[in-house]
Image: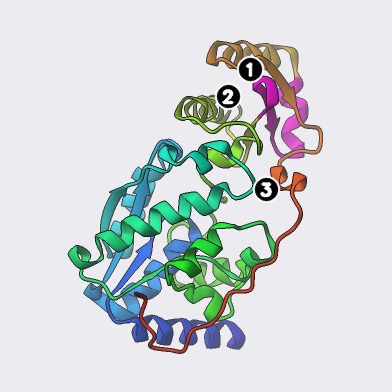
Amino acid sequence: MEPQLQQKAERLLQLMSSYGRVAVAFSGGVDSALVAKAAVLACGDRAVAVTGVSPSLASGELELATSVAAELGIRHEVVRTDEFAEPGYQANAGNRCYYCKTELYTELAAVRDRLGVDVICNGANLDDQGDHRPGMRAAQEHHVRSPLIEAGFNKADVRALAKAWNVPVWDKPASPCLSSRIAYGVEVTPERVRRVDAAELFLREALGLRELRVRLEQNELARIEVPLSAIEPLAQPEIRNQVTAEFRRLGFRYVTLDLEGFRSGSLNAALPMVTLEISRPATGAASS
């Protein structure tokens, strides 16, 4: 391990140890999995991973989170969240994630005594500060710690340390919630996210891809993003006709193929960039 990464790893473990009894908001992705691994190393059985479950969670993600938690050796709990009941979330303006994270952190705070923890933390890293992440404001409001940010980790650092620590999902592609596929201004509903989920599952089976997105735009238009290398195969008549027929069956009115290819967060291009500076609490400060 490179000396700089080793120093960051030591800082991360010191931070986690200072938290005492800790709950990790755990999606099963590489960021939260690395924090969970650090929690196990630093806190032992005083650590717990907690996964929020709602219709916005893609198929297979809960099962993966359960499996990863077991492999990491951390206690795993599930809480049900109801962000779809919040009008601000359904409206799907640029601050939708704020309502989602507010609901999650509120639920985690409500069960904190039952879980037996002092601090709640998430898997945000430094690169998240340069993207449109209104959920980070919710974290601040609920005194949720971001140990990866506090220890100076960017995304490349996260993957490098996760690989060095044998975290099983170190190379897992990002898998944001299904609601992130719905264009801003289009109402988010359980039916729409289920449709997007079914469409992405179909494409994965048809094309064997790890990374893709089905974006739901205005007028029930499905915009498919796949890696550039997959555009030509997907456009072949036989595959194209299968995809179009399945998407129409699922309820999409139009089906398009994005010639720019897959890119994470493409819907954020419609929004002004927001940079949120995350404060770094003094070591040992507990959430409340």
* Residue bearing mark 3: 265
Q: Position of residue 131 (x, y in %)?
A: 68, 59
Nearer to us: label 2 or label 1: 1
* Residue bearing mark 2: 206
Query: In the displayed structure, would residue 121 be above or below residue 88?
Result: below
Q: Is residue 265 magenta?
A: no
Amino acid type of the residue that numbered disc 2 sits on in the rendered structure? Ala
Mark sitting earlier along the chain (3/2) = 2
Mark sitting earlier along the chain (1/3) = 1
Q: CA distance from mark 1 to mark 3?
A: 23 Å
Query: In the displayed structure, would residue 227 be above or below residue 257?
Result: below
Mark sitting earlier along the chain (2/1) = 2
Q: Position of residue 203 (x, y in %)?
A: 58, 27
Q: CA distance from mark 2 to mark 1?
A: 9 Å
Q: Position of residue 34 (x, y in %)?
A: 45, 67
As drawn, which residue projects farthest toward the front?
A: 87
Is any atom of residue 133 visible in this view? yes
Q: Position of residue 231 (x, y in %)?
A: 75, 30
| Residue 262 placement, left or right of 133 | right
Q: CA distance from mark 3 to mark 2?
A: 23 Å
Amino acid type of the residue that numbered disc 1 sits on in the rendered structure? Val
Q: Which mark is residue 243?
A: 1
